[in-house]
Amino acid sequence: MQVPAAVGIVGDRYGADDAAIWAGNPTAGNLRARFDELPCVGQKKAAMAVEILEHDMRVPLTDLTGADIAYDVDVRRVFLRSARLTAL
């Protein structure tokens, strides 16, 4: 039930455009808060997503304060794979 609810939030708040979540050069804190709003994303997953977007996907963030965490390599691998599929 959490994933459909998260999809609904992305549809309602971001016009069904998942990339709009990190659009506009947000701060790391703002981006984490956006991910925290999703019911299936906890604090650690939100922080990992911010780190992966900034470090690996080169998403520009205006302030990286609080973005440093040690992320799980398996979560990183899955996130990067899904991001590549979205780009196709």
Image: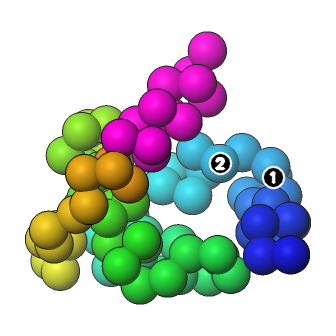
Q: Which residue is mark 2?
A: 18
Amino acid type at circle 1 is Gly
Q: Residue at x 72, y 45 (%)?
A: 17
Is residue 79 something one can see in this rendering? yes
Residue 13 versus residue 84: which sits nearer the camera? 84
Image location of residue 69, percent across then percent down: 16, 72
Q: Which residue is mark 1?
A: 15
Image location of residue 32, percent across then percent down: 41, 75
Mark 1 and mark 2 residues within 8 Å of each other at the beta carbon: no
Q: Going by the image, does 50 lie left or right of 12?
A: left
Q: Is residue 28 above or below residue 10?
A: below
Mark 2, secondary structure of its residue: helix
Check if residue 86 falls in the magenta segment.
Answer: yes
Image location of residue 64, percent across then percent down: 17, 68
Quadrant in which the C terminus appears: top right
Q: Is residue 24 above or below residue 36?
A: above
Amino acid type at circle 2 is Asp
Quadrant in which the N terminus appears: bottom right
Check if residue 3 falls in the magenta segment.
Answer: no
Mark 1, secondary structure of its residue: loop
Label 2 neighbour load within 10 Å: few <14, some 14-19, many 20+: some
Main SS of residues in magenta: helix
Q: Which mark is residue 31?
A: none
Cα separation, mark 1 vs mark 2, equals 8 Å
Q: Quadrant of residue 62?
A: bottom left
Q: Residue at x 42, y 71 (%)?
A: 45
**Which residues lie in the magenta part?**
77-88
Question: Which colouring convention does the figure follow?
Answer: rainbow
